[in-house]
Amino acid sequence: MSIIKAGAIAKGMFLLMKNEPHLVTDREFVNPGKGSAFVRLKMRSLVSGRGLQQVIKSQESVEEINVEHKDVQYLYADAENYHFMDLQSYEQFTMPLEGQEDKKLFMKDGDTVQLSFWDERAMDILLPYKIVLTVTQAGVGLKGDTVSGATKPVTLETGLVVRVPLFIKEGDRLLINTETRDYVERAT
């Protein structure tokens, strides 16, 4: 852990706020004409998944925490937990679903993913920016329906439903943006 000035905070940093580790998801530096400069932060708790907005004067100190990243194998998810295996020691462990339920829509059993660890506890699943998933169910698009941008909903192998162009069919492999949940293109 280290103490830094609020003005040095950047997006992607991990901070200890209200005795919980938080990931900085957005940062805005504001220097008003009158008064002192401040930083407006949007953060997500790595424990509960809840969002937190905080305004801190740029000269105030905050505590940055060291978070370790480790590659693990995603095994499966049950009603309460994700189940992973350490690729080095083959030790299996769990991580609560709470606050990160939607991430299972981007992981298949057996995938290698990266986890953030703080204080020996798994805190966050780091998804790649884009992933490849296979279409398991594709409805028929109406050819004359161009009002909706000529798209149709499809279901992917993880259960994620996205809107895609009419030419996409069952079995196609698609590149999906994990942040926006949008179709990017067909994967080769």
Image (cartoon, helix red, strand yellow):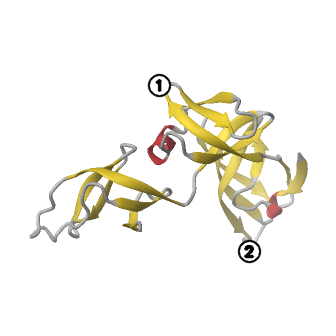
Q: Looking at the image, which residue is at 23% across and 70% down?
A: 149
Q: Looking at the image, which residue is at 37% across and 67% down?
A: 186
Q: Position of residue 57 (x, y in %)?
A: 79, 58
Q: Is residue 50 above or below residue 126?
A: above
**Residue matched to label 1:** 79
Q: Residues within 10 Å of mark 2 (few under 14, many from 20)?
A: few
Residue 74 lies left or right of residue 171; in this view the side is: right
Return the residue nearer the eye: 60 or 162.
162
Q: Nearer the viewer, mark 1 or mark 2?
A: 1
SS at mark 2 in the image: loop
SS at mark 1 in the image: loop
Q: Position of residue 130 (x, y in %)?
A: 51, 61
Q: Is residue 48 above or below residue 147?
A: above
Q: Which mark is residue 117?
A: none
Q: Looking at the image, which residue is at 41% across and 67% down?
A: 184
**Residue matched to label 2:** 33
Callout 1 amino acid? Ala
